[in-house]
Amino acid sequence: MSDELNSGYDVVVVGGGAAGLNAGLMLGRARRSVAVIDAGRPRNAPADGVHGLFAREGVPPAELLARGRAEVRQYGGAVVSGEVSGIVRDGAEFVVTLADGRATRARRLLVTSGLVDELPPIPGLRERWGRDVIHCPYCHGWEVRDQPIGVLGRGPMGIHLALLFRQWSDDVVYFAHTNTPPTAEEAEQLAARGVRVVDGEIAAVEVADDRITGVRLADGSLVRRTVLAAPTRMVARAGFLADLGLRPTEHPSGMGEYLVADQFGRTEVAGVWAAGNVTDLAAQVGAAAAAGAMAGAQINADLVTEETRRAVEEHRALTAL
């Protein structure tokens, strides 16, 4: 079920994941008019359950989102299906346009549009994503414990990821693939932890009976694995912000691109906040939800400050008569 899009709101939240829905909940409870616009492409959709989330361990992602939408609506907020294609400033407000031509106005914006995981073009990798191709040991480590795990060497986090997954299994292989070879210090760390290093480019992920059976190298050899951990390049979904002059920047970790925001979610563009994975690439569901709550409270406080200033001006004008 999707709510209708009204002509204007105190706050428009772009993105209906954990951060966006928790912000919508906070703003609704603050008696703000708020619309959460949801494109319906949650990052964790392929996962069977959400893990590491207090009191909701293992809950299916779709169920968690459904509960969140119902809670936003309980307090008068709207959850609107649609994809935001562009946003422009019009005086003190923003005009938010959807891909289907609908539009609305907002006094404040909260961007919780999340990110896209970019995987290397290895045959079989994307198809297994979220099942036996994983990326986060804290999200999936318990479920793959004691299995033969392969870690794809990609970007600055590959070796770190291999050492992390060693906590969950004593059978971990690090595939150097096209990554820079381990330094002498890194090679020593991997050897000391019993992580085998396999050189050579990966040609494909082998699958049989709907599960990974191994990793095929370019030389034709097969390294048998049942799980593959693949660091992704994470890129914020933020193209619709270009007209506001707000663009993603390279993350200091080298893991991808993000929107810069302060600890409260405020961006460099006045009136625009950001929360969740769009600004914190490593945030799990609980952290994203907490950031959404913080940003929602900060936006309400900002609106209260503006409304108080206007009330004082009107009060002074009246008392001056």
Image: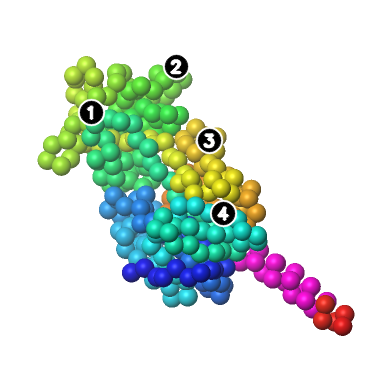
How far apart, in angstroms, are the residues tagged by discs 2 and 4? 51 Å
Which mark, residue 184?
2
Query: Which colour scheme appears in the figure?
Result: rainbow
Task: Give the residue at mark 1.
Answer: 204
Q: Which of marks 2 and 4 is nearer the N terminus?
A: 4
What's the residue type where badge 4 is placed? Answer: Val
Q: Which image quadrant: the C terminus? A: bottom right
N-terminal of the pair, mark 3 or mark 4, is 4
Residue furthest to the right in view is 320
Residue beneath disc 4: 88
Instruction: Judge whether residue 304 can be spotted in this image.
Output: yes
Q: How far apart are marks 2 and 1 (CA)?
A: 28 Å
The residue located at (41%, 20%) in the rendering is 180
* Amino acid type indicated by mark 3: Glu
Local SS, label 1:
strand
Q: What residue type is labelled 2?
A: Ala
For the residues carrying marks 1 and 4, which lies nearer the camera in this image? 4
Q: Which mark is residue 250?
A: 3
Separation of disc 3 and disc 2 at Cα? 28 Å
Residue at image location 49% in from the left, 47% down from the top? 238
Q: Which of marks 3 and 2 is nearer the N terminus?
A: 2
Q: Residues under labels 1 and 3: Cα distance?
A: 29 Å
Above or below residue 191? Residue 213 is below
Which region of the structure is painted magenta? 298-316
User: What residue is at 74 percent from the left and 75 percent from the top?
Assistant: 311
Q: What element carries label 3?
A: strand
Q: Earlier in the sequence, mark 2 or mark 1?
A: 2
Q: Is residue 148 visible?
A: no
Label 2 sits on a secondary structure element that is helix
Mark 1: amino acid: Ala
